[in-house]
C-alpha cells in the first residue's frame, strides 16, 4: 500500500515535525490494538515496525520536497482492511505534519 501526502513545508520542517510526532503513531490505532516502533535509517526515511492483530507489518515514510510517501507492506491476511487502512493513513498521516 502506497500513499503520497502532498506538503509545502520543505524537507527540514517535515523532518522536524515527524520527529516531534513519531511517538504518536501508535495512538492512531484503537487502544491496545497495535504497537509501533520507528527508526530513522536515513535522514529522510523513517521505518515503521507495527504489530497489529497478531501480525507484523513493516513500512516506511519517505520525505521528498513536495510529498511524504507512506508505504506499508500489508500481509495478505489483512488485505481485507486495505481500504479502511488507506483512509486512516490519509487522515492520521496529516497529523504527523501538523
Image (cartoon, rainbow, N blue to C red):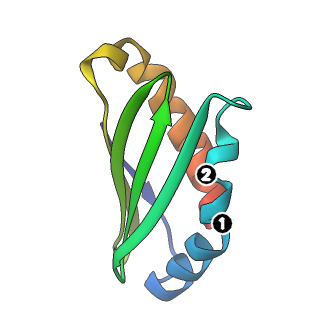
Q: Is residue 88 left or right of residue 55?
A: right
Query: Which percent across, then down, holds residue 33?
Result: 63, 28
Query: Which residue is pictured at 31% across the width and 14% down the height?
Result: 77
Query: Which residue is pictured at 56% across the width and 70% down the height?
Result: 18
Q: Which residue in the protein does label 2 denote?
A: 25
Q: With respect to residue 95, does 57 lie above or below?
A: above
Does the rendering let one see residue 9? no
Picture disc at residue 51: none
Are the two marked residues, 1 and 2, in contact with CB atoms closer than 8 angstroms?
Answer: yes
Query: Which residue is pictured at 65% across the width and 61% down the height?
Result: 23
Q: Is residue 73 left or right of residue 91?
A: left
Query: Which residue is pictured at 60% across the width and 54% down the height?
Result: 94
Query: Which quarter of the picture shows residue 19?
Result: bottom right
Query: Which percent across, then down, holds residue 5?
Result: 45, 55
Q: With respect to residue 30, does 70 lie above or below?
A: below
Q: Is residue 17 left or right of residue 42?
A: right
Does the rendering let one see residue 22? yes
Element under disc 2: helix
Crowd class of label 1 (few under 14; some 14 to 19; many from 20; radius 10 Å): some
Q: Quadrant of the C terminus?
A: bottom right
Query: Which quarter of the picture shows residue 82?
Result: top left
Q: Which residue in the protein does label 1 denote?
A: 21
Give the camera-side residue of 88 and 42: 42
Q: Quadrant of the N terminus?
A: top left
Query: Which percent across, then down, holds residue 91?
Result: 60, 41
Query: Which quarter of the picture shows residue 97?
Result: bottom right
Amino acid at each position: 500500500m502506497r500513499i503520497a501526502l502532498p506538503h509545502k513545508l520543505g524537507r527540514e520542517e517535515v523532518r522536524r515535525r515527524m520527529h516531534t510526532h513519531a511517538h504518536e503513531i501508535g495512538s492512531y490505532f484503537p487502544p491496545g490494538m497495535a504497537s509501533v516502533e520507528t527508526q530513522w535509517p536515513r535522514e529522510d526515511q523513517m521505518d515503521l515496525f507495527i504489530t497489529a492483530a497478531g501480525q507484523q507489518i513493516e513500512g516506511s515514510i519517505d520525505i521528498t520536497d513536495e510529498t511524504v510517501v507512506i508505504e506499508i507492506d500489508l500481509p495478505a491476511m489483512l488485505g481485507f482492511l486495505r481500504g479502511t487502512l488507506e483512509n486512516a493513513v490519509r487522515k492520521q498521516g496529516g497529523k504527523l505534519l501538523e
